[in-house]
Each structure stands twice: as structure tokens, then as C-alpha cells.
Amino acid sequence: MQKRIKVTSAGLVMLRGRKTELQARLKKVQGQKGEAAEVGGNQWHDNFSFEDLCRQETTINQQLTEINTLLDSTDVVSNPKDENVLEIGHVVSFEYEDGTTKVIEVCGFGETDLKTTPPKVEYCAPLLSVFMGCAIGTTENVRAGKRYMQATLTAICKKEV
């Protein structure tokens, strides 16, 4: 049985948009492939343009299969109801054993965006996955780069909309 993934409604829109984009690219490549077969001299033999477009078509079809698989295994989550345990949609703070702190917004699968403030990190990332469903004060060993260190969940709050 395939593992289910969790996304927000915005994440679902992103996945569907990616699928639409891939379908448009596939249609364009297929049209170009027909032209390359006609114009390229020898229909399929030693026709670099045609062969390249065939490779592109195969890649896009594989990407569409992956997107469809993701869409078939997606559960849309709503905003968290409370701040008792860590869920997708919360903004959380961690304190590492060395005294450094990190603030992160927990988001759905494929929704990571490190350029936002606070950075959005998907729930299945190594730091967050061990804390999902945990309460403030929970301490876990987490991977930080190439080493492990203790991190404590110090705050959970709802994202301000």
C-alpha cells in the first residue's frame, strides 16, 4: 500500500498546476516531434531533433506519472485547531543543545520555501518529522547537517493569516 502524503489546499493547487504545466509541455513536444520527423530528412534515423524530442516526451510522461501518483495519495489538511501538539500549519520554535534557536513554519509535502520568513519546511523533513504530534517541551535527537544533536520544541503557535 502506498504511503499517503499531506498537503494544504495551497499545496494541492500547486500540484495540480504542475500537472497542467506538464500536460501543456507534453502537447508542445509531441507537436514538435511530428515536425522534426517530417523536416529532419531521414524520418527516425540520425535525426537528433526527433530523438531529443522523444527523450523529452519520455521524461515528461514519467513526471506526469509521478504527479498523478502523488495526487492519488494526497490528503488535504486544514488549519490546525489548537496549539497543543505540532501539526501542519503551525509556526514552531526549537532550541538546540548548543543554545541556538530556529523558528519554522510547518507546511505540507512539496511546499518547502526557505526564502520566506519564517522559512516553510515540509512536515516530513528530518527535524520536523520526529516532532509531529508532540507537545511543547518534547526533546528529541535530530539530524543537524552531518551530526545529531538534541532539540527541544519550545513554542507552537497558529500561523497568522
Image (cartoon, helix red, strand yellow):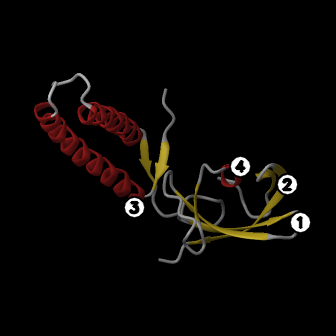
Q: Would residue 70 be found to the left or right of residue 119 on screen? A: left
Mark 4–mark 2 distance (CA, rounded to whole Å): 13 Å
**Callout 1–callout 2 Cβ contact below 8 Å:** yes
Mark 2–mark 3 distance (CA, rounded to whole Å): 33 Å
Q: Nearer the viewer, residue 119 or 53?
A: 53
Q: Which residue is mark 1?
A: 98
Q: Nearer the viewer, residue 44 or 64?
A: 44
User: Which badge, 1 or 2, comes first in the chain's sequence?
Assistant: 1
Q: Which residue is mark 2?
A: 149
Amino acid identity at mark 3: Ala
Mark 4–mark 3 distance (CA, rounded to whole Å): 24 Å
Residue 159 image offset from top left, x and y in percent = 54, 72
Amino acid identity at mark 1: Asp
Residue 46 image offset from top left, x and y in percent = 26, 25
Q: Is residue 121 above or below residue 44?
A: below
User: Which badge, 4 or 2, comes first in the chain's sequence?
Assistant: 4
Q: Nearer the viewer, mark 2 or mark 3?
A: 2
Mark 1–mark 2 distance (CA, rounded to whole Å): 9 Å
